[in-house]
Amino acid sequence: MIPTGIEEKLNQLLESQQELLQLQKQNSELLKTIADLNAKIALQAQTIAEQAETIAYLKKTIFGSKSEKTKNFNIPGQLSLFGDETPEDVEIEKEISSYKRKEPRKKKSTNEEIYKNLPSKKRVIPVSPEDRICPNCNGEMEHLGEKFVRDEIEIVPAKIIHVKVYQETVICRHCSSDESSVIVSAKVPEGLIKGSPATPSIVAFITYMKYVNAVPLYRQENTFLQDGAKIPRATMSNWIITCADKYFRPVYERLHHYLMDRILICMDETPCQVLKEKGKTPQSKSYMWLYCTGNDGLPPIAMYEYQPSRHGEHAKEFLRGFQGKYAVCDGYQGYNKLPDTITRCGCLAHVRRKWADAIPAARKKAEKNGKAIPAEIGFDFCNQLFEKERELSGTDDPERRKQIREKEEPDIWEKFWKWLDTIHASDGSRLGKAVNYTQNQKPYLMNYLLDERIPISNNFAENSARPYAVGRKNFLFHNSTDGAETSAIIYSLVESAKRNKLNIMKYLETVLTEMMDYNNEPENIDALMPWTDKMKTACSTD
């Protein structure tokens, strides 16, 4: 039996031990709470920093310059970015090497170049009758010569003419007394559109104004009214849709046939809006897909295709029957739907854009007198590769081009990848997005080295998207799917003609005129391809 005094002390010790354990538990909970709060504070600080960066980026996107150019980096006292040193040796202690465009400045056009394609006339300013009297003898003076004073440019506004078409009828007067009189009427060719006053010239003009000069139909309607012609925009729209389906579509399909025979194809997509689309609201997005040739030495082709969504199956279906090996595209995952027989090639321009976005606006404007930040280093890696490609632009020999590529560019890529592995950034930051995008595109970016005809960027397709984007800013939306499909067909002909250096309006008018007689015969449609001698002669810009 434990004495009463000792038992009380033991109970006190047990209570003290329990209180101590309770305090330790509370202290542990407090420490955990503090750690959680610190983590939340750090996360909030990171989120605030990322949001501030996003706000600065959006301000720059909306109000600032869209150019990716930056001031030349010149950081004294640091090592060369592309020397023998590795990132492990010097980490980011590197100089961002100067990036200077080596292309000569474009020469100013001479008067001869400006006026060489214009019809000319001579206008002589005569001496007034009162000045032709000699002040000495009052005799009439004779013509001595002319002196050139200046060049002038005049414009003759387009004329809208109402043409009344009549059919001639002839009769044989020798047989007129008999009951079997001979009467013959002229064979009248069918009109462009049955029951319509539309002609190839006016439809080509309206089409050119809308799809090349980005003038919406309602503005053209107002212009026609100023010239005394009342042509409603609905009528013009019907003319364009009808002619696109009846005359332009066969040429479009033939362009697609030739495109499928190329070794490589460049691809892109851009959103559009269609108001009346089955199963979709007017506010929903549709897409205009773009496909074009690269610098493969053959006549250029640019094609558009309207689709209701951005699903990669659309690209796969469009390329059904593609005989080539390579497709150049951006990082959109929908392109993973392409067949395994097609090697996907990445776009360095998209990668460089990510690094350019990660450079703060203040850094782009300020002189670089200190250590380069990672975004500037990544941006300069891209510039170095573009500079190598620019130096090869004048190399006509494909084998020579391939040898130079394989000799000089893989070393830059190797250093780029090794340096990239040393960069650790928040996924939500612009730098983190640049790093992740570049790493995700690693399997595709160097595939351009497989063939000397593959471009290092997807600028061919992006340049095709630009004319459509300009037009979209003006007409805003397509009223129907027929209108969207019509736009795809016409933009294909327009951009292909432009790339083949044809007069676009002449080309559209020639296609409309010739197709009225060709009856969609494939062997005749081949003559309407924008690279044929016939089209170059009929639609030359000279």
Image (cartoon, grey):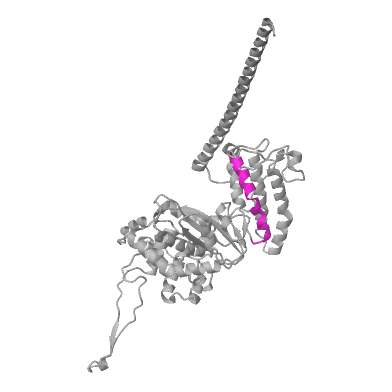
Q: Is residue 69 above or below residue 301?
A: above
- Residue shown at 56%/64% (left/top)? 300
- Relative to the observer, which residue lies in front, 289 or 357? 289
The quadrant in which residue 234 appears is bottom left
Can the viewer see residue 506 in this picture? Answer: no
Give the main secondary structure of the magenta stretch.
Answer: helix
Q: Is residue 437 magenta?
A: yes
**Residue 144 as seen in the image, left or right of residue 106:** left
Q: Give the residue furthest to the top.
A: 5
- Relative to the observer, which residue lies in front, 155 or 127? 155
Residue 422: percent from left, percent from top: 70, 41
Q: Is residue 143 above or below residue 281?
A: below
Q: Is residue 161 above or below residue 104?
A: below
- Relative to the observer, which residue lies in front, 291 or 369? 291
Q: Which residues are magenta?
A: 429-453
**Residue 302 as seen in the image, left or right of residue 85:** left
Residue 527: percent from left, percent from top: 50, 74
**Residue 206 as seen in the image, left or right of residue 288:** left
Residue 53: percent from left, percent from top: 55, 36
Q: Is residue 213 magenta?
A: no
Give the position of the N terminus as an image quadrant.
top right
